[in-house]
Amino acid sequence: MNAKKVFVLVCGTAALASAVTIPHLSAAAKGKPAATAQEPGRDTCYTCHDEIKALKEGSKHARLGCSVCHGNLGKHVESQGEVKPVTTIDQALCGKCHKDQYDSFYKTNHEAAARKEKGTPTGRSPQQDKLLAPYGFTIEHNEPRGHAFMVTDQFIVDRFQGGRYQYKEGWKGYDKPGKTWDVLVDKGEKTNLPETAMAGNPTCIQCKTSDHILKWKFMGDKDPKAKWDRTSNVNDVARDTNNPVGCIHCHDPHGTQPRVVRDALIQAIGKDPAGNIFAKGGKTDLKEVDFRGFRKIGVMSKTDSRMMCAQCHVEYACGTGSQWSDGKKVGYDDQRTNHMPLKNARDLLAHYKKLDFYDFKHAVTGARLIKMQHPEAETFAGSVHDKAGVQCHQCHMPKQKGKNGKLFSTHGVIRPKNHIKEACLSCHPKYTVEQKLYQIETIQNYTKGKMRKAEYWIGKLIDTYATAKRAGVPEETLAKARGKHEEAHVLWEFWTAENSDGFHNPDLARDTLTGSIKAAKDGVKVLEDAMEPKAK
């Protein structure tokens, strides 16, 4: 009897009960080795897992046996694939050898405040509630913290699931990273606190954890072999999530090659390998490895943290929406709810119109709006630093000395503004810390000023629209104003979602924010001109 071919991927952040069984057989799988009760050697594993052999042999991990990360291998072989191996993907396993990196990842960064709301007078988007109404982010939309809190911060936010998930220690628990259900408590499905929402979805969870890498088919499509997909109950997926994003998101565990695993990113790069934002000289250093039609990874020949970080730090669609063409709903069964455009603010509106997708209609104007997510990768693309060959890790994960005196890249992900010496001066040695900080703050001050002006004019457009509608301004004119609202919104909200306050690309920030201001002013003028005769 031919054995089923089993996809076993060594991973780095959560313990899985079994690997995902892939139904297709390669030529190598047809000659299954004789069953044995002993733990098989790697040659036995390679008989089926030829993709893994290509990654592992000759690599820094070549000497590690399969049983370092996989258990139950003897029974797996003996049963010809019926008994699934146990794959340990807990970060602590990687931390046994990479202790400095592991410890720095879980070190709480007290520079990054918890539950710091964007929609406050001193926040990144003071008029957020008005400009995003009635979208779920108006319930609570916080500044980001460190990667160690990616999962827990998502689950506790008021817009996720009605306040169902809370820290076990209450307000005292916010600086304690750890496994999800060691630090959080589930208050139960009947929980629905005042001023909360039910806006979580399974796709959004995939960039915040590596736990489901063997349980999720490429793009989150349904499959009998996949435990979870885009349409799964979000609370079931949440309860099965135990760890934040892990080592395996960026490092292949078999051979240590730099890699990406987020399906929507791999798909987006694959559609335009010569012209996407990461391409250099008409090529992108990313080789797709397809695991028998179930899932894919993208492997690089050299580290490119622009792509690694873009697994999360991009604009992407992950929620339900509607179609521009006819207003019909787009549900989680549609692949457009797991989509990365890889476009900057100038091109996003046209992209989403072509995709025939928008997130929501504004509560007052009815304008069809896009809800942006953290588009750092698209912002950085084409910037001065990008053109100079600088990558994310050089500024956000600078080298430091461990207790043993050896250099390592910190995995705590710093805020360069607070660590000028480590992040900036190795490339800019002629400057002092004070000088570089002054330059950074000048860019951010200017950008935040333009953000405030854009907010003001979009707010005025919304108010003027309401007045014009009450005054009986014709629908044709209102539609023109809605179009200007749609344009102004994308060019503004891109920057409230992006986390550098313009520093990643100050020229793009100025160009698009002033474009937002102009579009909003044009919309106001269209409405005021239409009301002028009625006022006489």
Image (cartoon, rainbow, N blue to C red):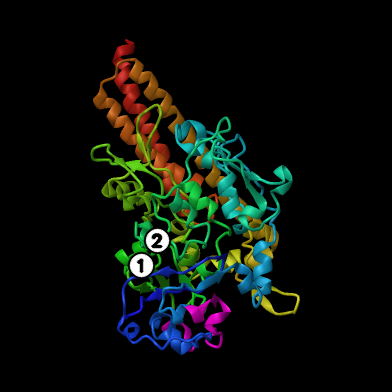
Looking at the image, residue 343 lies above or below residue 516: below
What label sits on residue 294 in the rendered view? 1
Please name the residue shown 34% across and 57% down the image: 221
Q: Is residue 515 left or right of residue 274?
A: right
Looking at the image, residue 487 lies above or below residue 532: below
Is residue 58 highlighted in magenta?
yes
Please name the residue shown 69% across and 57% down the image: 108
Picture quadrant of residue 25: bottom left
- Which kind of residue does numbered mark 2 sit on? Ala
- Mark 1 element type: loop
**Where does the magenta region start and end?**
54-75
Is residue 296 highlighted in magenta?
no
Q: Quadrant of the N terminus?
A: bottom left
Earlier sequence position, callout 1 versus callout 2 = 2
Residue 126 on image: x %, y %: 56, 35
Residue 463 on image: x %, y %: 43, 24
What label sits on residue 248 in the rendered view? none
Gap between marks 1 and 2 measured at Cα: 9 Å
Q: Is residue 405 left or right of residue 485?
A: right
Report if residue 429 is visible in the image.
Answer: no
- Which kind of residue does numbered mark 1 sit on? Phe
- Mark 2 element type: loop
